[in-house]
Image (spheres, coloured by chain):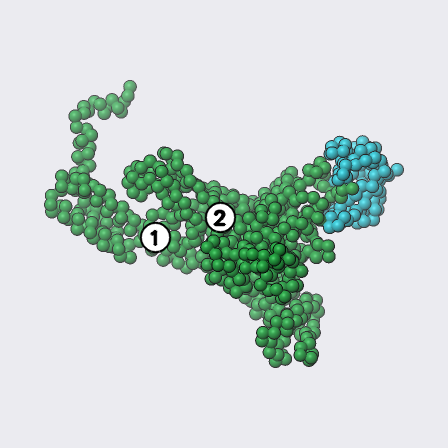
């Protein structure tokens, strides 16, 4: 399994990275917080830490720490619009249920 | 599924913790809202992809019937209920408005209130309420775009806005249900958008803002992360609309058309002028064409002719630039960066002429319509706490000096203009008369020495302190200006601890042109002011001396003075009183000196007597004992 990006997500990440002027790619993680157990972390990555797994998809490096990978493996990162709002979406096959707003989830 | 944004490493916020923040450019003609997402600041668009929100509100019987673009399009149908350019009124009193050109554009309701109201079908509306309706729409757009409630906003205001205009803007935001993190000056926001606040070295920045109906030039100085507005100048009736008007005049002249009162014709001429102007941004020629009374008129406008038409207008802005530089005591070569703001700076000839004037490339990379909102969004993001290392703590300065009236109608400056805000300054004052138990405090704003030449911001009284001899009471007056440039004045009498306070509330304000005039006047009238101050000081001195002399003479004149000595003093006193009525400071001074010399004997005798009184019957040892308590 791996972590993948849709074309829309990859385009936006490229744009944001270019605008920021530095960074090797994207870091995905989960942490135990939020209203329904786990929450996603989506950050710019400036370095790869020891033990990190690096995926390369659609010309974007995605860095994930091994602990988070357990919850994230198979995830597809998408970029979408809901009305005027726009942002990144995690299509995560591991998720059993999530809180109403979708910012946190359970496996 | 929630939509997520990318954070900086280690700065991802917990769910529901990320505070949504936006920057709002509340403009005279158009407004915008912007935010920072995934590290990039961008303006927010409506459903139709339009970022620009015309600052126009139309009122019907049940309140707002149309707003923004829709209201602007309907303006001709219902001109009296369609309010535009309300920013020209905010924070001004009815008298201010009557004295300005803005009075032509609005129908004001007659009221006793100091806050003017505009007549609409939805009832009388204040400028604050109309602005709040615009802000409400922008808030709704931001919350839809961000998918949550806004934690707070940064709203921009012109650099020349005074306290009441700033307070009124803040009140409008509050009325719209917005939490205002801070008001930021428009030119400062533009400089932030270009990242000029993060330069290593100190720099001087000129912000050239040519909007639809107004022109502003601001000279900013950035020193250790603090923006200081060195000077502002401009023209409240010069902008892109004048370019359109110039094109219409040219076309009408070419074809000998009489426009008169025909609103439809005026409108189509202006629409065509705007289209031609936009075409000439990248073309060398454009067709000016209208249908009128079944006839078709057409002219081709070359870039050269366009240049010659616009040249005159740009020259007027450059004159203001020269004025702003002069006021800031700078040369063109002192300017490190020139930031272009406002849609009209897209016209290539404008850019070229400004670039030639400052002899450098001007900054035009960021959309000039959006640059102010983008800067405000960057600032809002920092203030929302989304960036822990908020190295960008933006500071501003107060535009005009703040002070208090002292005896004789003189101004004592407490916070000089261009002081970095937030700031608190205290100064001690005392009483003028014996037994005084109250003091009237009059807060004024301006650069002149006499109260009547400055602007009154507010008055309050400090009452009920312990009576004492003149000059003994200690009254501490504290001026506090918060980060938004809003003023609170408090006074405390230190012995009895009586306390009073006033907050400067919006009731009236100054037009930007008047602020400029006030600052300019303080320069041109400098000599006159010094003379006026000297005269006033001598008059106060004369008054005080006469009062003290009268108090003493009524008690013991006959005891210490012979009839002829007494007469001499009374003559000199009369001379002081008479010269006090003249406008000659020197004469009052001489009269006072004369009075002092003739009353020397009297003063000496009184002094001896009082010393004698205290010491009589006391042993010299008792003094020594007091000196050496051991």
Q: Please provide percent x and percent y for residue B433.
A: 29, 42
Left or right side of B71 for B329: left
Q: Please provide percent x and percent y for residue B6.
A: 74, 43
Q: Quadrant of the N terminus of chain B?
A: top right
Q: Colour of chain A?
A: cyan
The answer to whether residue B565 of the structure is visible from this angle is: yes
In this view, B95 is above or below B12: below
Judging depth in this view, the residue of B414 and B581 nearest the camera is B581
In this view, B291 is above or below A7: below
Query: Which of the 4 image quarters holds residue B293?
Result: bottom right
Mark with earlier residue (2, 1): 2
In this view, B96 is above or below B626: below
Disc 1 chain ID: B
Residue extending furthest toward the top:
B630
Query: Which of the 4 image quarters holds residue B285?
Result: bottom right
Q: Residue at x 65, y 65 (%)?
A: B348
Label 2 and label 1: CA atoms lie apart by 29 Å
Label the green chain with its letter: B
- Residue B533 - label: 1
Q: Quadrant of the C terminus of chain B?
A: top left
Q: Which residue is mark 2?
A: B505
Q: How many marks?
A: 2
Q: Please provide percent x and percent y for residue B189.
A: 60, 51
Judging depth in this view, the residue of B134 and B349 nearest the camera is B134
Q: Residue at x 51, y 53 (%)?
A: B91
Residue at disc 2, secondary structure: loop
């Amino acid at each position: 399994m791996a972590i993948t990006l849709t074309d829309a997500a990859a385009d936006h990440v490229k744009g944001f990275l270019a605008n920021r002027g530095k960074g090797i790619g994207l870091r995905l993680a989960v942490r135990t917080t939020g209203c329904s157990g786990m929450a996603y972390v989506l950050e710019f990555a400036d370095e790869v830490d020891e033990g990190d797994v690096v995926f390369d998809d659609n010309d974007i490096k995605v860095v994930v720490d091994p602990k988070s990978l357990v919850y994230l493996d198979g995830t597809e990162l998408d970029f979408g619009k809901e009305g005027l709002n726009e942002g990144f979406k995690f299509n995560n096959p591991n998720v059993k249920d999530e809180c109403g707003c979708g910012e946190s989830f359970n496996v | 599924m929630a939509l997520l944004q990318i954070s900086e490493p280690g700065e991802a916020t917990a769910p529901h913790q990320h505070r949504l923040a936006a920057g709002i450019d509340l403009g005279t003609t158009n407004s915008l809202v912007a935010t920072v997402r995934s590290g990039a600041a961008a303006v927010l668009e409506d459903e139709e992809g339009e970022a620009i929100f015309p600052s126009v509100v139309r009122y019907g019987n049940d309140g707002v019937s149309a707003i923004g673009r829709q209201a602007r399009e309907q303006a001709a149908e219902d001109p009296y209920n369609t309010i535009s350019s309300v920013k020209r009124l905010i924070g001004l009193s009815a008298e201010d408005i009557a004295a300005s050109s803005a009075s032509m554009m609005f129908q004001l309701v007659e009221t006793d209130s100091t806050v003017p109201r505009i007549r609409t079908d939805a009832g009388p509306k204040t400028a604050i309420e109309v602005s709040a309706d615009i802000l409400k729409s922008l808030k709704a757009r931001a919350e839809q775009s961000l998918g949550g409630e806004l934690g707070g906003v940064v709203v921009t205001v012109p650099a020349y806005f005074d306290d009441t205009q700033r307070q009124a803007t803040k009140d409008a935001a509050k009325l719209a249900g917005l939490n205002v993190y801070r008001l930021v000056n428009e030119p400062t926001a533009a400089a932030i958008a270009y990242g000029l606040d993060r330069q290593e070295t100190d720099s001087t920045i000129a912000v050239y803002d040519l909007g639809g109906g107004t022109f502003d030039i601001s000279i900013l100085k950035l020193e250790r992360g603090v923006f200081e507005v060195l000077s502002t100048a401009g023209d409240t009736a010069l902008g892109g609309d004048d370019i359109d008007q110039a094109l219409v005049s040219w076309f009408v002249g070419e074809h000998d058309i009489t426009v008169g009162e025909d609103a439809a014709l005026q409108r189509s001429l202006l629409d065509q002028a705007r289209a031609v102007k936009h075409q000439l941004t990248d073309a060398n020629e454009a067709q000016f064409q209208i249908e009128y009374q079944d006839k078709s008129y057409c002219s081709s406008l070359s870039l050269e002719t366009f240049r010659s038409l616009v040249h005159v207008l740009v020259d007027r802005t450059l004159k203001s630039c020269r004025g702003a530089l002069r006021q800031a005591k700078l040369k063109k070569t002192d300017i490190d960066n020139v930031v272009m703001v406002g849609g009209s700076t897209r016209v290539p000839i404008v850019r070229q002429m400004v670039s030639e004037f400052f002899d450098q490339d001007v900054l035009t990379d960021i959309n000039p319509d959006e640059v102010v909102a983008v800067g405000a969004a960057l600032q809002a993001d920092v203030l929302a706490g989304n960036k822990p290392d908020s190295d960008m703590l933006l500071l501003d300065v107060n535009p005009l000096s703040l002070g208090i009236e002292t005896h004789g109608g003189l101004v004592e400056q407490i916070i000089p203009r261009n002081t970095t805000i937030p700031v608190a300054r205290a100064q001690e004052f005392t009483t003028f008369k014996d037994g005084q138990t109250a003091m009237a405090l009059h807060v004024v704003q301006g650069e002149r020495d006499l109260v009547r030449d400055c602007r009154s911001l507010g008055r309050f009284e400090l009452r009920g302190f312990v009576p004492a001899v003149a000059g003994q009471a200690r009254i501490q007056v504290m001026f506090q200006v918060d980060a938004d440039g809003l003023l609170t004045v408090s006074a405390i009498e230190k012995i009895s601890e009586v306390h009073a306070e006033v907050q400067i509330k919006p009731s009236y304000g100054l037009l930007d042109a008047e602020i400029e005039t006030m600052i300019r006047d303080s320069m041109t009238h400098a000599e006159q002011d010094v003379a006026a101050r000297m005269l006033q000081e001598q008059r106060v001195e004369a008054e005080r001396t006469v009062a003290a002399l009268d108090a003493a003479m009524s008690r013991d004149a006959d005891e210490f003075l012979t009839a002829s000595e007494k007469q001499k003093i009374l003559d000199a006193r009369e001379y002081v009183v008479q010269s006090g009525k003249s406008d000659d400071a020197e004469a009052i001074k001489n009269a006072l000196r004369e009075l002092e010399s003739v009353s020397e004997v009297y003063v000496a005798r009184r002094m001896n007597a009082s010393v004698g009184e205290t010491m009589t019957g006391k042993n010299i040892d008792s003094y020594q004992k007091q000196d050496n308590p051991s």
